Amino acid sequence: MRDSIVVIPTFNEIENIETVIRTVFNETNHIDILVVDDNSPDKTANKVIELQKEFKDKLFLEVRSEKSGLGTAYIHGFKWCLFRHYDYIFEMDADLSHNPKDLNRLYEKVREEADIAIGSRYVKGVNVVNWPLGRILLSYGASMYVRLITGMRIKDPTAGFIVYKREVLEQIDLDKIQFVGYAFQIEMKYKAFLKNFKIIEVPIIFTDRIKGQSKMSSNIISEAVLGVLKLRMNSTFK
């Protein structure tokens, strides 16, 4: 078994899933893939099952009964990976907004000098392709807001392209993670920050999806805004 695995949550990603799987395996020889699919109506899981015939020992699939949120999909995947003793556990999107070529860069950072390596859109300016100005301002503004409220110095706290050492996930109580949308990404980083794990940001270029539909919604944004305040209040009173 290889020492690393990337968790890819999916819901209606039939247009992207084969490309992202093949690209990950083309770019790396030490990383397995776990797809966590929320019973996609477009049969994303069926495509993964088809590809498992080709990638027998390194492509895995977990199908949940219904769409239950990004955060719970990652928690499901993290527990699956910890049980199977992977040392380095990645998370990335299925829509090719995260370039699989950057997996090796994150891997080297977390092996050599960090507990968590984040593929960051904002560590060196703003490296986002195909986003409208309004969304860039919303995302960048949210990052500044999170830094102000939490005290973290992470420039891209909502980033979803990350690798954790297994020790980090073992020391975070995954059953107590509260949030399911973009606030989940903030909460995971904040819990690691409070435990003094070393977090490094690696500059990447983020490209908005070309195929399929974005999962962004007003509820996700509201959860992130209010969730940051809740996280800070809870840690302060504790």
Image (cartoon, grey):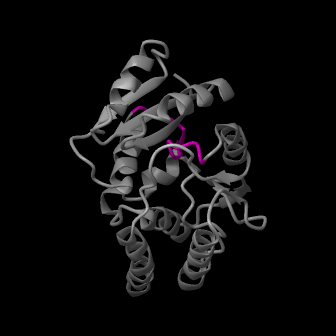
The residue positioned farthest toward the right in the image shown: 124
Give residue 26's quadrant in the image.
top right
Q: Residue at x 62, y 29 (%)?
A: 23
Task: Identify the image quadrant of the C terminus.
Answer: bottom left
Q: Residue at x 63, y 69 (%)?
A: 136
Q: Residue at x 46, y 41 (%)?
A: 8
Q: In x, y percent, where is residue 169?
A: 46, 51
| Vertical comparison of 34 with 219: above or below | above
Q: Read off the magenta span.
A: 84-97
Residue 3 in view of the camera: no
Horizontal side of residue 159 vs 60, given as left or right = right
| Vertical comparison of 152 with 108: above or below | below
Chief SS of the magenta region:
loop
Residue 231 in view of the camera: yes
Relative depth, front residue between 132 and 202: 132
Give residue 179's quadrant in the image.
bottom left
